[in-house]
Image (cartoon, rainbow, N blue to C red):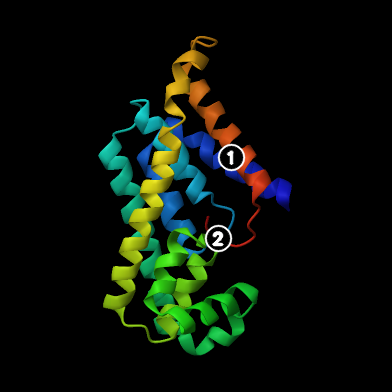
């Protein structure tokens, strides 16, 4: 399963230099909603590198990542609000952790699950909706957390940009270089943290 996940993530990441913001937005939105095997954080990290290298517009890249994450989160919250009565069927270790953290921290749990404990993010969206956390409180915490998440990963990705000119001297195909960078980043980080559930 790990090999399949890694291969799929590599494929998605390799599309970013070719297709740009639509791939970024679609991946982040679906991962935030809870679709598994989508490397949202890695995608934003690589997008940060591309933006710093001038291959993607910086502001549009940041806004795409942020808005896509917010849309996915709101869909998860709505799912929890509508189908909350059936939440017991979805219970598992991740859902139980999200429930416990939400009960202890309230909106702060939503904020932290955007970036500090991001694997809980999709489950937190659902339990927040099912648990009756008001939408304004959810949205404010969600917005603040997603700003931290998107900005942090874009900044981390931008830190790789100064090395691109030196590496580019070894190849005349910049698109291939950037695609290879995406795959290399994915492989390195996925080896350090394999996540079986959704984002990130």
Residue closest to the far bottom: 85
Mark earlier in primary sequence (2, 1): 1
61 vs 33, left or right, is left
Report the Cα–Cα distance between label 2 and label 1. Answer: 16 Å
Q: Quadrant of residue 9?
A: top right
Q: Label 2: state its secondary structure.
A: loop
Q: Is residue 23 visible?
A: no
**Rendered location of residue 196, percent (x, y):** 64, 60
Counting labels gives 2
Residue at image location 73% in from the left, 53% down from the top:
1
The crowd level at tag 1 (other Cα within 10 Å; few <14, some 14-19, many 20+) is many
57 vs 50, left or right, is left
Position of residue 134 relative to residue 51, above or below, is: below
Q: Are the residues tagged 2 and 1 within 8 Å (C-beta)?
A: no
Residue at image location 60% in from the left, 72% down from the top:
94
Residue at image location 60% in from the left, 62% down from the top:
197
The disc at residue 186 is 1
Q: Is residue 122 visible?
A: yes
56 vs 115, left or right, is left
Pointer 2 residue: 198
The front one of 4 and 104 is: 104
Q: Label 1: state its secondary structure.
A: helix
Residue at image location 51% in from the left, 44% down from the top:
42
**Rendered location of residue 171, percent (x, y):** 53, 11
**Rendered location of residue 40, percent (x, y):** 48, 50
The crowd level at tag 2 (other Cα within 10 Å; few <14, some 14-19, many 20+) is many
The disc at residue 88 is none
Position of residue 145 relative to residue 25, above or below, is: below
Q: Nearer the viewer, mark 2 or mark 1?
A: 1
**Rendered location of residue 91, percent (x, y):** 61, 81
Q: Quadrant of residue 69?
A: bottom left
């Amino acid at each position: 399963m790990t090999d399949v996940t890694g291969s799929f993530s590599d494929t998605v990441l390799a599309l970013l230099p070719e297709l740009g913001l639509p791939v970024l937005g679609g991946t982040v939105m679906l991962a935030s909603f809870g679709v598994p095997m989508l490397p949202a954080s890695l995608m934003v990290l690589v997008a940060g590198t591309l933006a710093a290298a001038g291959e993607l517009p910086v502001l549009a890249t940041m806004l795409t990542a942020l808005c896509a994450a917010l849309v996915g989160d709101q869909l998860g919250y709505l799912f929890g609000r509508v189908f909350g009565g059936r939440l017991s069927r979805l219970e598992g270790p991740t859902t139980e952790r999200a429930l416990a953290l939400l009960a202890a921290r309230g909106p702060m749990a939503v904020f932290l699950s955007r970036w500090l404990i991001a694997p809980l993010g999709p489950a937190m969206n659902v339990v927040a909706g099912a648990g009756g956390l008001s939408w304004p409180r959810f949205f404010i915490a969600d917005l603040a957390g997603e700003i931290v998440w998107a900005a942090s990963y874009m900044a981390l990705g931008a830190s790789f940009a100064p090395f691109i000119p030196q590496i580019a001297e070894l190849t005349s195909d910049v698109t291939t270089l950037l695609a290879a960078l995406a795959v290399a980043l994915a492989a390195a980080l996925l080896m350090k943290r394999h996540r079986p559930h959704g984002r990130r």
